Image (spheres, rainbow, N blue to C red):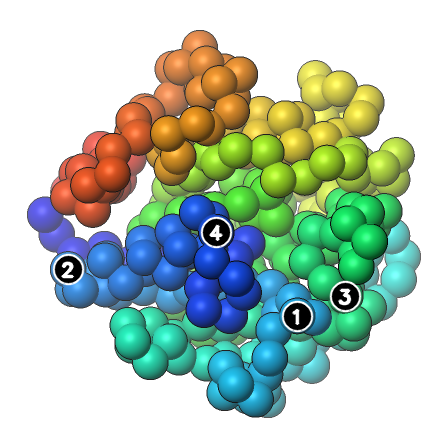
Amino acid sequence: MAKKKILFINQEISPYVPDTELSVMGRELPRAMQERDHEIRTFMPKWGNINERRGQLHEVIRLSGMNLIINDTDHPLIIKVASIQQTRVQVYFIDNDDYFSKRQMTADEKGIDYPDNGERTVFFARGVLETVKKLRWVPDIIHCQGWMSAVIPFYIKTAYSDEPSFADTKVVTSLFEKNLNSDLGPGFRQSVEYRDAKGSMLSAYDDKFDFDELGKLAIDYSDGIMLAQKDVNPMLAEYAKEKGKPLLPFNEDWADGLEEFYDTVYPDV
């Protein structure tokens, strides 16, 4: 197969956060594709529980400094970078004091989901896409993993559809088991609005935008779906089948199959 440019947008990546199936896949997918000579870029949030000194993170001044407006409020975008020594995979981190640096991950120290998780996922999504534009790098495929990346497919097909960086990009979404307990709150539809991405476009989904509704949104606007776990949410797996999306079934030996799946989603010309 022809070598591709693949943008991985991950909610979690080991070893920067504790090992879970999601964080290990966040590390292993980019590693495997890089070892197969594909050109990759990898992003994740700079969660507050990440040890910057141990992970050797440093700010990329030329990429930082932009303000993203969400719900009429400016939020500074900070970009940091580090490399996973064992895999030589470089990781870009999306940072902001209010949304990430001073917080834990999905939930606070008491295990309660943050009420502004909707704004956080919008900031993360737009931060990644704006940074990729600054890098002047045009991905063939964007591979999203975790609910924090679930609005990326929606943005690619709406707000960023006319951007040269993403005009021909195809989107793959990995499905995992539920790891978000609360919904994103009544303000999510307003938070997501940007350019041609309108809150009214989400009218087909339940009023309470929870993990399942985010999954449906990602499926609806993706070009292919990967079942990343054996026990993935069965409702979302069935939803993807009903939508007729190209589907990569769960397989513990996924690397070769994933390459072939990328070819199905983005065939070589």
Q: CA distance from mark 3 to mark 2?
A: 36 Å
What residue is drawn where x is 79% and y is 56%?
A: 108
98 vs 100, left or right, is right
Q: Earlier in the sequence, mark 1 or mark 4?
A: 4
What residue is drawn where x is 66% and y is 77%?
A: 78
| Residue 216 location, quadrant | top right
Q: CA distance from mark 4 to mark 2?
A: 24 Å
Mark 4 sits on what residue? Answer: 20
At label 3, counting other C-alpha atoms closer than 10 Å, the crowd grade (few under 14, some 14-19, many 20 or more) is some
Which of discs 3 and 2 lies nearer the camera? The answer is 3
Measuring from the top left, give residue 258's x and y in whole percent: 23, 41
- Of the numbered discs in the image, which one, if any, rests on residue 103? 3
**Which amino acid does the dot numbered 2 rest on?**
Arg
Q: CA distance from mark 2 to mark 1?
A: 32 Å
Mark 2 sits on what residue? Answer: 36
Measuring from the top left, give residue 93's x and y in whole percent: 56, 71
| Mark 1–mark 4 CB contact (< 8 Å) | no
| Mark 3–mark 2 CB contact (< 8 Å) | no
| Residue 267 appearing in the image | no
Q: Earlier in the sequence, mark 4 or mark 3?
A: 4
Mark 1 sits on what residue? Answer: 49
| Residue 187 location, quadrant | top right
**Which amino acid does the dot numbered 1 rest on?**
Asn
Q: Earlier in the sequence, mark 1 or mark 3?
A: 1
**Which amino acid does the dot numbered 3 rest on?**
Arg
Q: Earlier in the sequence, mark 4 or mark 2?
A: 4
| Mark 1–mark 3 CB contact (< 8 Å) | no
Q: Earlier in the sequence, mark 3 or mark 2?
A: 2
- Of the numbered discs in the image, which one, if any, rests on residue 266? none
